[in-house]
Image (tube, rainbow, N blue to C red):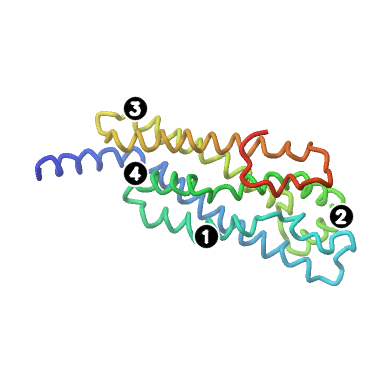
């Protein structure tokens, strides 16, 4: 009834006082992440049009950058707008986040991790060239820092979700049960996805053969 709805709204407001700093951190760091990906793609995605590009780097754009452009577009066009649109509805954020995982929209990180070893090897082989580009761009961090950001971001999500869970449980007098349950389900799925992502890197240990390409076998689940 109307009285219960008002009481629930009061509880939600009290709860939000405790979780607002975590939510603000989630959104602020997401904004920074998207901007860093944009700058990195602008800086290092354009080198393949340069006349001084080493012969060994020609035609190796995907080997170097992997699908980081796909990751950038997903966060810019889907994930970050979702966070902004639902910043006053935390449960919807958790539910939408889980929906993205269920629909394999975060699978782009598995693909990125599969390619990581080849990318790092290329960066190391042409480190002098990339150092020169870094100096020209006045980029304080360099290409290696740019290419490790998706890995770091993926590892950050479970930690933020655990902060939500801990805070909601600590102030459980004010929490709404479905909100906590939704966050717990999301945190579990996120950790499972992170494990899959980390394990996918060892697919590179499979010796290449002519019979099939291990990168073209559908959705990676387990080594």
Which tag is nearer the camera, tag 4 or tag 2? 4
In the rendered structure, are the residues bearing label 4 and label 3 in contact, judged by CB atoms less than 8 Å apart? no
Instruction: Assess disc 3: are there few (<14), some (14-19) or many (≥20) residues with their C-alpha within 10 Å of its C-alpha.
Output: few
- Where does label 1 land, which residue? 76
The x and y percentages for residue 211 are 81, 45
Q: Earlier in the sequence, mark 3 or mark 2?
A: 2
Q: Earlier in the sequence, mark 4 or mark 1?
A: 1
Instruction: Assess disc 1: are there few (<14), some (14-19) or many (≥20) residues with their C-alpha within 10 Å of its C-alpha.
Output: some
- Where does label 3 land, which residue? 170
Q: What secondary structure is marked by label 1?
A: helix
| Quarter of the image that includes the C terminus | top right
Q: Earlier in the sequence, mark 1 or mark 3?
A: 1
Instruction: Assess disc 2: are there few (<14), some (14-19) or many (≥20) residues with their C-alpha within 10 Å of its C-alpha.
Output: few
Q: Which mark is residue 128?
A: 2
Q: Which mark is residue 127?
A: none
Q: What residue lies at 44% left-to-right and 59% top-to-bottom?
A: 81
Q: Earlier in the sequence, mark 4 or mark 3?
A: 4
Q: What residue lies at 55% left-to-right and 48% top-to-bottom?
A: 106
Asked if residue 125 lies left or right of residue 12, the reply is right
Q: What residue lies at 10% left-to-right and 45% top-to-bottom?
A: 2
Q: What secondary structure is marked by label 2?
A: helix
């Amino acid at each position: 009834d109307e009285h219960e709805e008002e009481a629930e709204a009061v509880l939600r407001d009290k709860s939000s006082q405790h979780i607002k700093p975590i939510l603000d951190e989630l959104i602020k760091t997401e904004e920074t992440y998207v901007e860093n990906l944009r700058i990195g793609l602008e800086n290092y995605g354009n080198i393949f049009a340069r006349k001084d590009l080493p012969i060994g780097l020609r035609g190796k754009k995907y080997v170097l950058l992997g699908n980081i452009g796909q990751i950038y577009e997903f966060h810019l066009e889907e994930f970050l707008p979702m966070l902004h649109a639902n910043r006053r509805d935390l449960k919807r954020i958790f539910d939408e986040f889980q929906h993205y995982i269920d629909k394999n929209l975060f699978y782009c990180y598995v693909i990125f991790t599969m390619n990581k070893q080849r990318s790092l090897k290329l960066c190391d082989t042409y480190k002098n060239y990339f150092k020169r580009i870094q100096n020209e761009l006045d980029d304080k961090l360099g290409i290696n820092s740019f290419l490790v950001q998706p890995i770091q971001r993926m590892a950050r999500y479970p930690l933020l979700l655990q902060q939500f869970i801990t805070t909601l449980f600590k102030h459980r007098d004010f929490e709404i049960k479905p909100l906590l349950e939704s966050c717990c389900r999301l945190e579990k799925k996120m950790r499972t996805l992170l494990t899959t992502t980390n394990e996918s890197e060892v697919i590179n240990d499979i010796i290449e053969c002519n019979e099939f390409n291990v990168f073209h076998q559908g959705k990676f689940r387990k080594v």
